[in-house]
Image: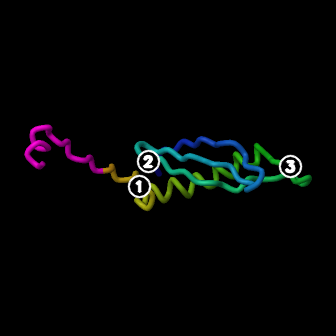
Amino acid sequence: MPELTTKIGAYDKGKRTVAVTFISGEIEHKRDVNAVHKDDDSYDKAGTKARVAEVALGVAHKIGLGLITAPAPEPKAPIEDAADSATAE
């Protein structure tokens, strides 16, 4: 499996998720992960970190299979030459 790092964003109380960025080489995959909560329904930061690690195993596997890839670079628009613009008018 490819080496993968994760960056866990802030907890979203409304959605009960954390935004996570998974990075492997040139591939950057972003998704929300369901947060873990304690018995009193408070946010469990350590539990959520463990949950993100579990999700990361699946993301790494999908990257290894080529199911998650880096987006194709956007094509660059040709640079218009000033002389070409003058003749087009």
Residue 88 horizontal/vertical position (percent): 11, 49
- Judge left or right: residue 5 versus residue 43: left
Residue 28 horizontal/vertical position (percent): 47, 47
Span shown in magenta: 75-89
- Judge left or right: residue 89 versus residue 61: left
Task: Determine which residue is flagged by label 1.
Answer: 69
Could you say which quadrant of the image residue 82 lies in? top left
Q: Amino acid at mark 3?
A: Ser
SS state under label 3? loop
Number of disc labels: 3
Task: Determine which residue is flagged by label 2.
Answer: 27
The numbered mark at residue 42 is 3
Q: Amino acid at mark 2?
A: Ile
Residue 35 horizontal/vertical position (percent): 73, 53
Q: Is residue 79 above or below residue 56?
A: above
Between 41 and 60, the one nearer to me in the picture: 41
| Residue drawn at 34 percent across, 53 percent down | 72
